[in-house]
Amino acid sequence: MDLRAQRDEIILWGAAALVAALGTWVMYDAMPGINWGAWTLIAAAGLFIFLRTAGARTIWITSGIAVIIAFGASITADPFIHALIVLSVIFFLALSMLLSSNPTFRRLTAWFVIPAPVVAFATAITESIKRGIDALHLVRSERTRSVLRGVLITAPVIVIFALLLASADPTFAGWRDAIENLLTSWAFLPRVFFFIGMLAITLGAYGFAQREASQPAPVPESAETARWLGATERLILIGSIAALFWIFLAVQLSYLFGNLPHVTGSGVTFADYARRGFAELTVVATASVILILVSERFGKTDGREGLLRFATIALIVGVLFLLVSAFNRVLLYEAAYGYTTARLYAQCYMIVVAAALIALIWEIRGPIQPQRLFRVAGLVATVVFVVLVYWNHHAWIAGRNIDRLATTGRLDVTYLTRDLSLNAVPTLTTRLTALPEPFRSELQRALVSRYTGRSRIFNREWYEWNLRTNQARDALVHLGIKLDGPRPPATQ
């Protein structure tokens, strides 16, 4: 190994060790906060240090999305969203790593994107093992052995001198006792394993970017697909399904866009009304998109492009009408039974599906490119998720449910205080004084029961800073709840 290669290897190991050490310090056994965003930003920046491939705009985008989502952990206090943030950051960082060999948008296909986290993990571990073997060769050099001998000679001398100085200074004595307690309790082992795991993945990711930068992998050209579905068969298939669907819409018009549960003797509840609509959406919309894509990919036109395009558009528009109907049913369900995160997430899913269908209409103007459609749908889903991360939808849900009290006379206090996260607490405490009895007292008792003695949630290190957790703490303290007091007894 020549001198330049040795230098590159040392820089690689040093950068990976620093990023892994930082991650271990601010994220091991730590609450989600600004630490997630800061580490993701530094880890992504480290990847660009070793990336030498020109035209890395795609990696800038995937890494930037990872950083934006990661910083959302310092805004929201919703544990469910935190879990999705972790998965999303892993996903987009995995894409950034794999794209380092050839950062082009054309590689963002379904076959490349969906298994990206698994492929990236396996690749990173393999690359880390290779780098470990390379490091063994590096250790054999005379210069490196001299450094190691110097460290081995110096370390025991430093330890002896530090122990002697600890007897003469209370600060050194405190450090000595802390290290002794750490070593004797074996509490450092999980942290060490966490560091080793992060080091292996980081080293592998950086090593892959460095190794692949000089030899970009070409994007394979897609072979011409055999087209076995004739134009007549396609017209019969697409046209018949579109016709059936429009007949269904016409017959069921009052059911789809009306308010069937209010019809006497219908036998349909609001729960069935919304649930059936969502099931129709997921099955019909997904099956229709798949059907159209398969028809376009394997189908012949035989000069009937106009008729096929008309039948396809008719089918898509019919699915969009069902989508509007399903969205309306959820709105009716919320008006009758209240707002929940599950119902809001269902509406967000409908928005993503609608965007995909509109993109599909745009695509069928010419030859459909499924991978481009996949990228558009993925972009819309990412934007919707980022909005959910930064928008305080728990507070919005709490406010809308409190607004319903004036017209329905019902308020699900248990859901507001148990199922909603800290994000909703400032809204609940602000609206508390305006609530009529007995709801005001019931809500206050529920808040006291849940958050009294929960100081660990709010007492954080600086790198665990979270905006909405701080807002919730201030609101609870203002309400007079003793966060550091004894936990109230559990009610039967």
Image (cartoon, helix red, strand yellow):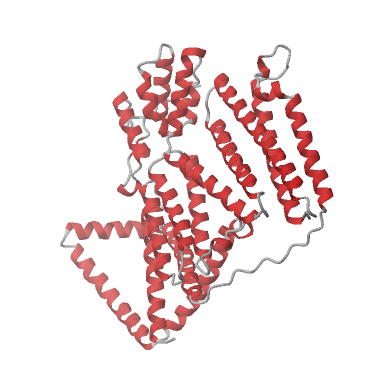
Residue 225 image-quadrant placement: bottom right
Q: Position of residue 306 (x, y in %)?
A: 74, 47
Give the position of the N terminus as an image quadrant. Answer: bottom left
Q: Position of residue 433 (x, y in %)?
A: 35, 17
Q: Nearer the viewer, residue 418 or 467?
A: 467
Left or right of 245 on screen, residue 179: left
Any part of residue 409 in sight: no
Residue drawn at the location 67% of the way across and 37% of the way down: 317
Name the side, left or right, on which 90 lies relative to 4: right
435 to 195, vertically: above or below: above
Q: Is residue 125 left or right of residue 269?
A: left
Q: Residue at x 46, y 41 (%)?
A: 387
Foreground residue among 370 and 486: 370
- Residue at image coords 35%, 80%: 148
- Image coords of residue 323 (percent x, y): 64, 34
- Please tell me whether residue 162 is drawn above or below residue 452 in the rendered image: below
Between residues 425 and 320, which one lies in front from this camera angle? 320
Query: Where residue 310 appears, x then y in whole percent?
Result: 72, 43
